[in-house]
Amino acid sequence: MSNTNVNVTGAPFVDDSNVSKSGVTTDEACSFTQIGGGGSGSVSVSTDAPSSVTTTDATLEGTLDSLGGSSSVSVSFEYRENGVSSWTSTSSSSQSSTGSFSEQVGGLTADTTYEYRAVADAETGTTVSFTTDTDTSSSLVAEADTVALTPSQWTSVSLSKSFTDPIVVAKPASYAGSDPVHARLRNVSSGGFEITLEEWDYQDGTHATETVTYLVVERGTFASSDGSLVETGTVSTDEATATVALGGDFSAAPLVFTQPQTENDALPVVTRNDNVTSSGFETELQTELGVNAHGTETVGYIAVEDGLTDLDGIAVETGNTGNNVSDDWYSVGFQSAPSSPGLLADMQTANGGDPCTLRHRNLDSSGVELQVDEEQSGDTEVAHGSETVGYLALDGSGTQTPTESFAEVGSETTDQATSTTRHSVSLAQSYDNPVVIMNPASYNDSEPVHPRVRDVTSTGFDFELEKWDYTAGNHGTETVGYAVFEEGQHTTDDGTKIEVGTTTTTDSWTSVSLSQSFGTTPIVFTQSMTFNGGAPIVTRNRNVTTSGFDVRVQEEMALGGHSVETIGYVAIEPGTTSINGTAMEVGDTGLSVSDDWYAIGFTDSFGSPTFLADGQTTNGGETAGIRYRDLTGSGAEVFMEEEQSEDTETSHANENVGYWVFEGTGTL
């Protein structure tokens, strides 16, 4: 339970039902006000503090103090939302002795204050108020990226994920040019926003290109995958200080990032924050010195718990500098060594009153330098008192958007002349850390075979149609589809999550933990990408969950054992989706695929399908791969193909096979 506020005002009262801000926890003194009740009769009833308050339910508590000489008394409760004139009555029950009674009520609204009172016959007890919990069950939606900006030129940013009411913060700017500058937003909508570099009015409007990281989070209060609280919202303000009350149950002062979402007044403006506590903060607009007024703007805010590590699949590191950042450069060291990091930073204090913003330089995986950058319209002096700065370092692997190609799909049709023949594939684009998935082979030649990938580079890879050692090395022509992904976390056009990575394993099982939280069990595809052991192998998967899976390699049964190989993997949520407009479908067969052919029917129709498949289970222990045939726009057939080095028997237990079909080939 979280965020339960119980307000009982008036005469001191100690309640053993243990009411605290988080509901029923430890003994704590509270108080109440006698708003109504008492009467002239001798029946007496008291209203106690509620218990078990959630987002939609509460248990109302009361005590029958006296029956007034009656053999029984009818007891119940009346409750209402704060500010509503009429009461709602609960069902009544008969009580023949003094003591406590309770009633659970449902259908309440999250983060809403209610009041209630106990009723005994015609008598009513005191009125007690409580606040239902904040609903953090909604899915957190966030995305981030870094953009290059110049002054006086608005850049349109299209959001790749599905937002309803996004909040955008983009600060601070880099330090390519030394003149004071900051980012300005406008036209924030569910589909995107506009952003530019804004200089102060006393400047000439020319400035070097700067980079700015933006973070977009859906409005609301959320629990991230690591349990950290995230709250976003807006407040309308001008140069007067606005106080923002946070609805989330932050255990300590969060890190707060603010920025105007509107351009109602074209005068340059920044926001300043102060007095950040667990329950709220203050923010105001600042214009350059000498400008005494600014029109009202809608200011967006993002408040996060310090210690947050994941924002909707984006790996982040949070921290605050303490009261150490001034007009001198201050070094911040990162602990998580984020890859190609983006940076969000904002002052949490307003110790220096002159208008200013932050700048950053030397941003890399080890850290960044920060500086308070004062404007100089009134004087050239830029000395500034030390401020506390909160920051978010965002791992670059989590900030990619589908507008940037991070994958490609292809298909190879070839034979295997000898066991040493290699086939080279040149990629359409260059990758930093490519992961290749290439499986299964078609079934033109009935001899067991599987693709083996090796020598993966940023621009290509080699493969062969690998046969088991007990068979001849040559093989007839087969068609094999492949997909290459940049390592990291990605999303499709509709926000479907993809995670790409590598691990190492032998013929023993290796457990792989997924870095992001999947809402449904993903479909996992694995591929050996090295050739450290010369014996033929396939990969096998098992125990696929929302948080990870197991993988190993298998040699033919007559051999066993194998050197360490690097295994590439791709995990993706099932369903129909697209990447940059390329249609695709991901699904599984359930426990239906054995040594008999099994027909997969696609939900959508594909004009020129490229097909991948991999096992999600290892129910049959004997070494086996997958083959496919009869691939059309509406489906394909697959079966489990056992090798026969120890015996000729090929029957295989039912396995769950995951599949991925793409429309055509090319970059995604």
Image (cartoon, rainbow, N blue to C red):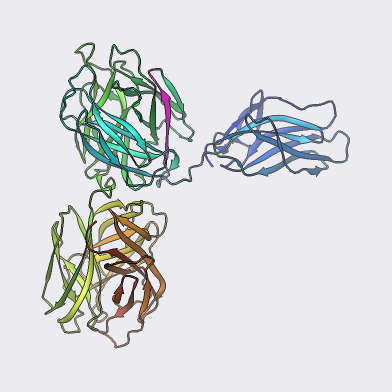
**Left or right relative to 533: residue 125:** right
- Decide: is 476 above or below 662: below
Q: Quadrant of residue 454?
A: bottom left
Q: Residue 198: in sight, yes or no?
A: yes
Query: Which residue is drawn at the image coordinates 38% and 28% (left, top)?
Result: 299
Residue 438 point in image, percent of width and height: 23, 67
**Left or right relative to 260: residue 382:** left
Query: Which residue is drawn at the image coordinates 74% and 36% (left, top)?
Result: 63
- Decide: is 151 above or below 459: above
232 drawn magenta: yes
Residue 407 point in image, percent of width and height: 23, 56
Residue 248 point in image, percent of width and height: 48, 35
Q: Which residues are magenta?
A: 226-239
Residue 385 point in image, percent of width and height: 28, 17
323 drawn magenta: no
> What secondary structure prevails in the magenta region?
strand
Q: Quadrant of residue 586?
A: bottom left
Residue 219 or 327: which is nearer the viewer? Answer: 219
Residue 26 or 619: which is nearer the viewer? Answer: 619
Q: Work out which quarter of the rendered image holds the C terminus and state it.
A: bottom left
**Left or right relative to 304: residue 152:** left
Q: Work out which quarter of the rendered image holds the N terminus and state it.
A: top right
